Image (tube, rainbow, N blue to C red):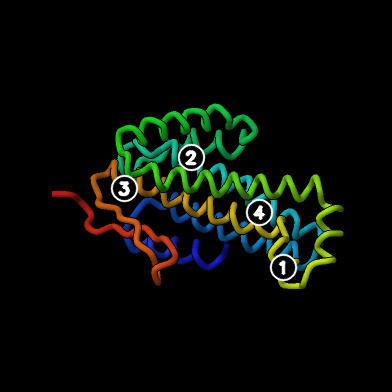
Amino acid sequence: MILPPIYGAIQTCKDGLEVRYVWSFLGLAAVGIGSWSFHMTLQYEMQLLDELPMIYSCCVFVYCLYECFKQERAVNYLSITLFETLHALICTKVNKCINILSVLCRVHPWLRALGFTSLSIFLLGFVLWNIDNIFCDSLRATRQQLPPVVGAVTQLHAWWHILTGLGSYLHILLSLQIRSTYLKHRPKVKFLCGVWPMLHIESQKAC
């Protein structure tokens, strides 16, 4: 997941939205670059480039969701410091964000589809990753008996990267949509080439 979040960051700049969402997209792109570098080289330094951006980009994701209902252009430096230095204690913020999402889905039912899709895709990737970890030897032996094409599409670790990347991307769209709605913009999810979801702001302010 490299090019789509870069395009998302550019589109976010064009729409004049807050810079933290640009960093969300760029953080996801950094995870994609780090993951690609690590799996191409299997070097320790590249492993750090893979895993550290995951931690920090997750902090940015949660921070964006947590700040959805603050005044425009407001920056909570205390929250930034807490999220970046005490990410191990982030569970309380995650719980509050889950509560926020729960309320939003009741007030704005049209957010449910994007929210549940994002969460479901991410969790599916997480489940496949665990299956691959637990049954690695058995899956590898079975894969060797399958045709090459079938064996390639049964690489559950690869699906973990694809699905969690897509789930994270959709989460950013959800966060952007919530924030834009709060600021009285008119966000709308459109599909690039009829396939890839993108968030577009139809006008800066509702009449």
Residue ID at (31%, 47%):
180
The residues tagged by marks 4 and 1 sit, at their Cα atoms, a distance apart of 17 Å
Disc nearer the start of the sequence (2/4): 2
24 lies above or below 100:
below
- Whether residues under marks 2 and 4 lie with C-beta atoms below 8 angstroms apart, the answer is no
The amino acid type of the residue labelled 2 equals Tyr
Element carrying mark 3: helix
| Residue on which disc 4 sits | 160
Q: Are marks 1 and 2 in contact (CB under 8 Å)?
A: no
Verify CB contact (< 8 Å) between mark 3 and mark 1.
no
Q: Earlier in the sequence, mark 3 or mark 1?
A: 1
Which one is in front, 128 or 204? 128
Q: Which mark is residue 63?
A: 2
Q: Residue at x 51, y 28 (%)?
A: 95
In the image, taking residue 120 as reference, residue 205 lies left or right, namely: left
Name the amino acid, label 3: Ser
Q: CA distance from mark 1 to mark 2?
A: 40 Å
The residue drawn where x is 38% and y is 49% is 176
| Mark 3 or mark 2, whichever is nearer to me | 3
> Which dot, 3 or 1, sits closer to the camera?
1
**Which quarter of the figure has residue 1?**
bottom right
Q: Total marks drawn? A: 4
| Secondary structure at numbered mark 4 | helix
Quadrant in the rendering for residue 82: top right
User: Percent position (x, y) of residue 107?
Assistant: 30, 33
Q: Nearer the viewer, mark 1 or mark 2?
A: 1
Q: Earlier in the sequence, mark 4 or mark 1?
A: 1
Disc 3 marks which residue?
Answer: 180
Drawn side of residue 204 relative to residue 161, left or right? left
